[in-house]
Image (cartoon, rainbow, N blue to C red):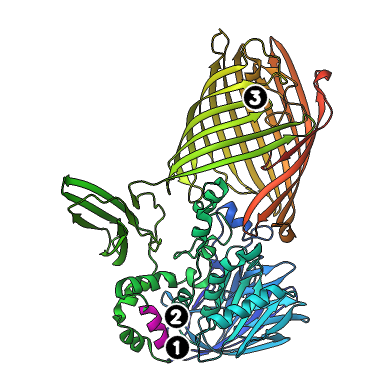
Amino acid sequence: MSVLFLLPAALAGTPTITLTATLRDDLQTITGELRVTDGEGIRFIDALSLLPQPTSDTVALRTWPRSPEQGWVEITEHADSLSFYAILPRRYDASGLVPGRGVFLNGLWHPQPVRGAALEDAYWDVTLTLPEGAVGTLNGSYGTSELQWQGQAERLAISAIPGGEIRSLPLEAGELVVVDSRARPALDERLAVLMEGSWPGPMAPDALVVVTPSRRRLCRPGPDVLFLSDRAFRATGGLWRYHSQAVRLGLLSAALPIPERWQRHLAAAAIADRLYEEPTPEELLGWFSWIPQIDDLLYDGRMPFFSEIFNETWPGDPLADDLQEIIDRHIPSRALMHRIDALYGEGTTLRLATGLLAGGSLHEATIAAGVPPAVLKDWLGWQAPVEMSVDVEALSEDHWRVTVDRIAEDNAPVEPVVVVIDEVERRLLLGPGSDRAVIEQPYPPSAVQLDPDRRLYQTDRSDDRWPERWTAVVSFFPYELNIRAARLSAYANLGLRRQYSTLWRYDLGAYTDPENIIGTSVRATRYLGPLVDRRYRVLRVWGGLGSAVLDPDFRPVTGSPVVAEAFIGTAWDTRERLALSRSGHRISAAISGGLVPGSTERWGSTVMTLLTQQPIGGRVMAVGRVRGGLASGDVEHRLLSLGGSGGVQGLPPAAFLGSDRAIASGELRWLALHNVSVPIPLAWVSEVQVSGGADVGTGSRDGVRTAAAGWSAGLGFVADIVGADPNFGGIWLAGPAWTTDDTLSNGLQLYVRISQPF
């Protein structure tokens, strides 16, 4: 619901808004009244109802404490005032009520003044009444019972924490106040160090920080206040330093004494960039990028707070739910800073910031810094992503051409583009809209890199380098341990793909499982369809060749245990690659066949799988899987197993092997603990899952049909390794409930897993 009112045109001049409001004891309802003077042409809108809703599991898990909710502000017009009634959604990230923690709102809760399509700065005189026992904030003011604030801003940011505390951190000069639900000595110490080391003198800092249960962004600056995630600085050892740049930028964006929001944020970006520490996260992790988890962490963008930790120029949070992002969205302050510095020289934005901090107007500051004022206006508006590519062409032995292409919307502004040819940096100016630049030289370049610092807003960087660069990853992982059978399943793999490519991957692997002592394979995979994150797509098609040594403990082997095989398959999988994926579907089909070299033994099989998972309520998820398959041949190890992880989990993998198989499985998964932070060695447990399931299956061999049913129960955990990378692990107990053949039952099966059973 979105309600608009237009104030009478008779009001003129700078708008002044007097607002009184009460946050009720339920912490989900706010009532109030406001009056406006000199407000000609201002509209008041319900911004809370405009909050975008998550469309992916990744964002939903980090947005909703419980089930999805929508808030709204009901606005009623009176003769000389407006009254309002706000219902707050349960939502993380300073946009609602977080059960058990409090209210955190960076604006949104009151009738929002706008002029045309832009937020309107107004002079506010505000009184907010808090529930008894709550500690609260109102922009830069803090306290209990009743808060008052006067000043210029485009929004009112509030918080209310039942039983909270106020801490004044010792600084050499100025004041840094933290409002929180509990003591955090390590966070306080690091905040104080950052503030003293970042603040541009000579004025003393005056800053207010509200520690917030935020799961998508480390920092959300408001007027005179910073909403800081309680995950800030929660990292193993010295890795907390990689949160420092984001927190530094947030502190300065909230506290610098510059009235206009976007100018304040631009100045903060320039000051913070000057203090950026080395080595960067990419440089630190680059030494370990051959590890698949590190490689994925660098490229797929799924890690919480990825953009802020990696100091990216453009935001990585796909849910644009800050007030400025909902209404009159601007490009990020760091993107604007890099454009200015690229075109007018390093340090230009810092000189502009110095002028603003000295009290000069924007016009005076830009002229003093050597920047035409019109340039900032052209660059300030939001911009859609551009597609960039570089190509090298030999026209003759001593005539080479480097072509840089930009594909962009017609209204995309001119922007500087950096291209590095043989370690020599050049700056091009491309645009408006789509454009091309050509560089000719008498010798062949050895390497060309476009946009090396990733300043441009791109969604695909696979064409930014010539010649193509390949990345390799090497891995070894045990993925399941059947304790009852004393059998470990594991794989080792060498993977190759073009840097930033989302289309092809090549793998050379080795594995061991209940059927094979050891196996090897070479595989090519083609990814198609829309992206589910920065790297992986929903559709993949694969094919390959392999060999294996059959395990005689699984079934007796007559003759040679060595087999050769080939396989092809395809899968459509809309699930996200999360430790706790909650929704989506998977449809897959695979065909394989092989032979025993030097003999007449052959086999062939085809398997299809249908899987669906859907959330039920806030913390419960239902998962269903159906598998069917046909197999024929002389090698028992390649027949279809009725038991094990792929079948009735309560039966051993070797209990029954057939020429056909049909399995139906279901599981309910309940998040007993969600978004907690329990420290363990080198990690923090953030989620605890309790699950229960059932399997039923049937298979036949030589005309004899067998059926079985079983149950399973599991306890799973998500641990944020070194405080950053969520990983899943758990233990499952399974047993038979019923079989048509009593010889299949072999007691309980115990599985240790690093992924969900299906």
> Does the stretch in magenta take in 298?
no
Main SS of residues in magenta? helix
Q: Amino acid at mark 2?
A: Ala
Dividing the picture into quadrants, the one containing residue 606 is top right
* Relative vertical location of residue 686 with respect to residue 583 in this rendering, above or below: below
Q: Which residues are magenta?
A: 348-355
- The N terminus appears in which quarter of the rendering? bottom right
Question: At which x and y percent is residue 506?
Answer: 46, 36
Q: What residue is pinned by disc 3?
A: 516
Left or right: 107 in relation to 704 = left
Residue type for callout 1: Leu
Q: Quadrant of the C terminus?
A: top right
Pinpoint residue 10: horizontal percent, then vertical percent.
Answer: 43, 90
Q: Are marks 1 and 2 in contact (CB under 8 Å)?
A: yes
Give the residue type that dot 3 points to: Asn
Which disc, if any, is residue 267? 2
Label located before the other in sequence (2 or 3): 2
Mark 3 or 1, nearer chain start:
1
Residue farthest to the top, as pictured: 600
Q: Secondary structure at mark 2?
A: helix
First along the sequence among labels 1 and 2: 2
Determine the CA span between mark 1 and mark 2. 8 Å
Between residue 32 and residue 295, name the one nearer to us: 295
